[in-house]
Amino acid sequence: MIDKDGFRANVGIIIFNDENKVLWAQRAQHDSWQFPQGGIKLNETAEQAAFRELTEEVGLRPEHVELIAQSRGWLRYRLPKRYLRYGNKPLCIGQKQRWFLMRFVGSEEDVKLDLHEKPEFDDWRWIDYWKPVEEIVFFKRRVYERALHEFAPLLFPEYRRLVVKPK
């Protein structure tokens, strides 16, 4: 679903474990890592899409996670011009995402990357909560930063985002 402004509706999923580390997955046949994410289908809610994508991409079912929070609004990023497919109508210029924070309550054996003929990911690991901001591809960085900051108070009670007021 691409909206009138050219943004494709999408979900992003941050899964954390008991040590507040997050699940980080390597895209198949690429040297890039990201959180699980995917498009929202017609007649599907963002939450339904998140659980569908969770199963499709990393093999986790609803019983393997506990839904903790959803982002307050859409977080958007634009695709670099080299990734735009000008032949497609409507033209997708980026993604608008609803983000979900989920606590992992399964076992590591529940993570299965090979459930589909063409897997999205071929490796995964647990990493420090803030590390994705450093590792994600540049055009998604601001969205990752915003999602992680929005959810941080739920994992880190002492968390206070520094707000610098203009002079």
Image (cartoon, grey):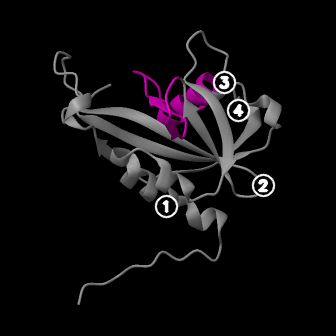
How packed mark 1 is, by other alpha carbons closer than 10 Å (few <14, some 14-19, many 20 or more), is some
Judge whether residue 74 can be spotted in this image: no
Judge whether residue 27 can be spotted in this image: yes
How packed mark 2 is, by other alpha carbons closer than 10 Å (few <14, some 14-19, many 20 or more), is few
Q: Residue at x 22, y 31 (%)?
A: 82
As measured in the structure, the alpha-carbon distance from the residue carrying label 2 to the one carrying label 4 is: 17 Å
Task: Say whether disc 3 or disc 4 marks the residue closer to the N-terminus.
Answer: 4
The amino acid on which the numbered mark 1 sits, given as a three-letter code, is Glu
Residue tagged 1: 150
Residue tagged 3: 113
The amino acid on which the numbered mark 2 sits, given as a three-letter code, is Asp
Mark 2 vs mark 4, foreground winner is 2
User: Which secondary structure lies at badge 1?
Assistant: helix
Is 134 magenta? The answer is no
User: Which secondary structure lies at badge 4?
Assistant: helix
Check the image and report above or below for 119 versus 37.
above
Mark 1 vs mark 2, foreground winner is 2
Q: Which residue is drawn at 52% across and 23% down?
A: 29
Task: Say whether disc 1 or disc 3 marks the residue closer to the N-terminus.
Answer: 3
The amino acid on which the numbered mark 4 sits, given as a three-letter code, is Pro
Could you tell me residue 153's position as x and y percent? 58, 67
Find residue 18 and name its label: 2
The amino acid on which the numbered mark 3 sits, given as a three-letter code, is Leu
Find residue 62 and name its label: 4
Q: Residue at x 47, y 29 (%)?
A: 38
Q: Residue at x 66, y 36 (%)?
A: 124
User: Which secondary structure lies at badge 2?
Assistant: loop
